[in-house]
Image (cartoon, helix red, strand yellow):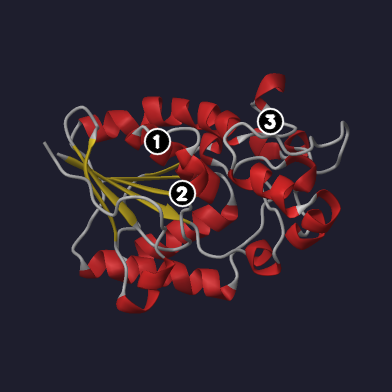
Amino acid sequence: MSRLVLLRHGQSLWNQEGRFTGWTDIDLSEKGREEARAAGRLLRECDLAFDIACTSVLKRAIRTLWIVLDEMDLMWIPAAPCWRLNERFYGDLQGRSKKEMEEKYGKEQVQRWRRGFCDLPPPLPKGDERSPRHDPRYRGLTEDQIPRTESLQDTSNRMLPCWQGQIAPELQQGKSVFVASHGNTLRALVKHLEGISDEEIELVEIPTGIPLVYELDDRLRPKARFYLHSEEDGKKRSGGWREELGGS
């Protein structure tokens, strides 16, 4: 049996301000840093350890990873950043106020963009300075790998090669893997792991800063899944789906 622990980064500055973030490289808020510290302490108290860690190339996820590993005294383990674990690319919504977008497009439309599986937000205009093509960390990407907008389905398609080529092989060797990433990217991974339907994934939300633990069989099928949480943050756990899975 292998163990996979997923952690959505702590609250970012734009989470705090209610803005769409996407690939914009926004750092953690002070609350987000404390969420990461609390997650690291909780993982240490539960005697969980990891052989390798994976993260996106965005600083809010990387800093979350650093803080967690520091709290666990595991800063020596290999840590592999991958752009495929980046948050969903929200196109022209990036940097925009969620409240203002609801006023402009309507709450139902914005909700479909945020939670639907196939819904595409408005694309980033060509030549927009917010495009990742201006960022040196993406200089090795091909033209078709640089998005102008992404649905959750697109995010899943972009993320899965990292799962198949980088994360899954480590798990198949019996290693424990820690992934610090983003809400939509982790939703896409949870959908893949659990076989959640396109409709049901709309009900799944990954809370910030609360470790989600999977115990996997030798075919990487979930035998058990649960959140680690303190009594005070238990209310933040995601609703609408099972807390634990029965093994076979």
- Residue under the point 40% across and 31% down: 163
**Mark 3 is on which residue type?**
Arg
Query: Which residue position holds label 1?
Result: 196
Q: Is residue 118 left or right of residue 146?
A: left
Query: Which residue position holds label 2?
Result: 204
Instruction: State the image coordinates of residue 228 (x, y, percent, origin top left).
Output: 29, 63
**Mark 2 is on which residue type?**
Val
| CB within 8 Å, label 2 to label 1 | yes
Instruction: Examine the rendered structure and indicate whether residue 159 appears above or below residue 237.
Output: above
Q: Name the quadrant containing residue 83.
A: top right
Find numbered disc 1 in the image and state the secondary structure of the residue it sits on.
loop
Locate the C terminus by quadrant.
top left
**Spatial distance from mark 1 to mark 3, Cα to Cα?**
34 Å
- Residue under the point 88% across and 33% down: 127
**Spatial distance from mark 2 to mark 1, Cα to Cα?**
9 Å
Find numbered disc 3 in the image and state the secondary structure of the residue it sits on.
loop
Query: Which residue position holds label 3?
Result: 139
Circle 1 residues within 10 Å: few <14, some 14–19, many ≥20: some
Q: Nearer the viewer, mark 1 or mark 3?
A: 1
Instruction: State the image coordinates of residue 24 (x, y, percent, origin top left).
Output: 70, 49
Q: Nearer the viewer, mark 3 or mark 2?
A: 2
